[in-house]
Image: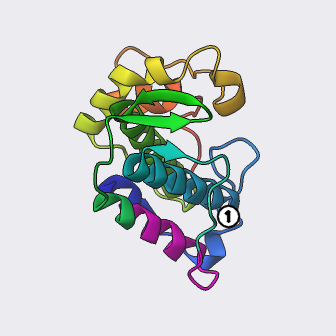
Amino acid sequence: MAYALGSLNVVTLDRLTSTTPCRGWDLTALLRHLDDSLAALHEGLTFGRVAALPTPADVGGDLVACVRARAVQLIGQSESSSTVTIAERELPRGVLAVVGALELTVHGWDIARACGLDRPIPPRLAAELLAVAPMVVTEATRPEQFGVPVMLSRAASNADRLIAFLGRDPSSDLS
């Protein structure tokens, strides 16, 4: 959460139309997606279920403030149950938390890149997420959500390997 919030701190109004590492998305589209994701995470982790459509947040049209508020709300949420129901399917609460951590981290990196910053993912966080990423991003889920993995040298950092696994080029030009 801290990594994603740190990236949100660098967003300025003039960057909202910047391209992101997410294929076909500008920063505004990415922030809207992240707002939806955070709403779903909050609902799942707090109430043990995720509705099909998230409720839009409203903080006077300030999208960055919206995303920040949703992220902070997650920090203080309480546990409701050991499982979460999403579209009639149950999964362990911990799985949703891991998916959320992966989502927040990679999009935190995307936000920083869209704002022209090289803000590497912290090594320990990257190592932990790299260990679980193949369980979350499979050949079945990849086409809809992520690009083809980018090939890197074996000497690449865990942060770069995580980003590359998720279809982003860690050496690409900054916006």
Q: Is 25 situated left or right of 150 in this image?
A: right
Which x, y percent locates residue 11? 52, 70
Amino acid type shown at disc 1: Thr
Query: What count of labels does the image hold?
Result: 1
Q: Label 1 neighbourhood size at 10 Å, few (<14), some (14-19), many (20+)?
A: some
What residue is drawn where x is 54% and y is 49%?
Answer: 110
Above-or-below relation of 46 to 12: above
Nearest the camera: 55 or 136? 55
Secondary structure state at the residue bearing disc 1: helix
* Residue at 37% in and 65% down: 73
Q: Quadrant of residue 148?
A: top right
Query: Camera-side residue: 17 or 46?
Result: 46
- Residue 99 to residue 116: above or below: above
Regarding residue 83, the answer to whether it shows in the image is yes
Residue 59 on the magenta segment: yes
Left or right of 171 in this view: 140: right
Residue carrying label 1: 28
**In the current view of this chain or complex, which residue is farthest to the bottom?**
60
Q: Position of residue 44 (x, y in %)?
A: 45, 46
> Toward the viewer: 32 or 96?
96
User: Which percent across, then down, holds residue 45?
Assistant: 39, 47
Vertical comparison of 39 with 166: above or below: below
Q: Which residues are magenta?
A: 58-71
Question: In terms of secondary structure, what is the magenta stretch mainly?
Answer: helix
Residue at (62%, 63%) from the top-left corner? 55
**Residue located at (37% from left, 45% from top):** 120
Q: Position of residue 127 (x, y in %)?
A: 29, 28
